[in-house]
Image (cartoon, rainbow, N blue to C red):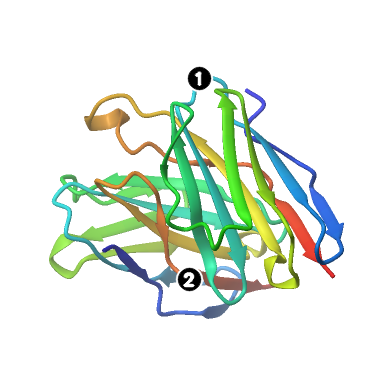
Amino acid sequence: AQKVTQAQTEISVVEKEDVTLDCVYETRDTTYYLFWYKQPPSGELVFLIRRNSFDEQNEISGRYSWNFQKSTSSFNFTITASQVVDSAVYFCALSGSARQLTFGSGTQLTVLP
Amino acid sequence: DAGVIQSPRHEVTEMGQEVTLRCKPISGHDYLFWYRQTMMRGLELLIYFNNNVPIDDSGMPEDRFSAKMPNASFSTLKIQPSEPRDSAVYFCASSLDVGTGLRANSPLHFGNGTRLTVT
């Protein structure tokens, strides 16, 4: 069985602060894929990143960065210099031999001006 | 590309009525998923198809729910009879997977969802 845990239910920061969203996963698959999605107040689900289990290289995209550590089964997401527009629910998700995505419960991020 | 298209965006119905949700996946995508989002249960998979064939329907709550994919460009999720506890946002998503490696387990592209309210 697969499981994704996002222990932080809600996070509130002030604009320009850095914030890290935690994600811990469980799977028995040796090949698997990890994802982050953003759900803004408008409700759509926006794909942010996909990583596979054999590539632990960290990734940076503008103000976003991701830290994948197999040793701790974690795939954390950091937003640098947060902005009000970053306010959203962020979901971590996992897929493996079973094609479907298993989602975490989400972290509500509020960035205050 | 137009993206995944779901209709209707909002549906309000009375308990006992039949509800049909519709989805048009991205052209060329071979996987289609139906998810449901509620405050209590989060995002949960209901069913998914590969090349129009249902692969896993273990998430379908009960016999009142049924899903079909008559062709590669259309899918429906039907609830009959509907109950208040079915109120949720229903998302359709599609993806394209070819073989292994970089094209495997590609991201799901989600529609904007259908917000269902059963009174």
Q: Residue at x 40, y 73 (%)?
A: A6
The location of residue A3, given as percent across then percent down, is 32, 67
Q: Residue B106, labelled with which disc?
A: none
SS of the residue at dot 2? Answer: loop
| Labels 2 and 1 positioned on one and the same chain | no
* Residue at mark 1: B28
The location of residue A33, given as percent across then percent down, is 29, 48
Instruction: Tell me which chain the residue with mark 2 is part of.
Output: A
The location of residue B57, given as percent across then percent down, is 45, 50
In terms of image quadrants, where is residue B16?
Answer: bottom right
Q: Rate crowding at label 2 as few (under 14), some (14 to 19) or many (20 or more) other CA atoms within 10 Å.
A: many
Q: Indicate the amino acid at tag 2.
A: Ser
Q: CA distance from mark 2 to mark 1?
A: 30 Å
Q: Is residue B23 left or right of residue A77?
A: right
* Residue at mark 2: A105
Q: Residue at x 41, y 63 (%)?
A: A78
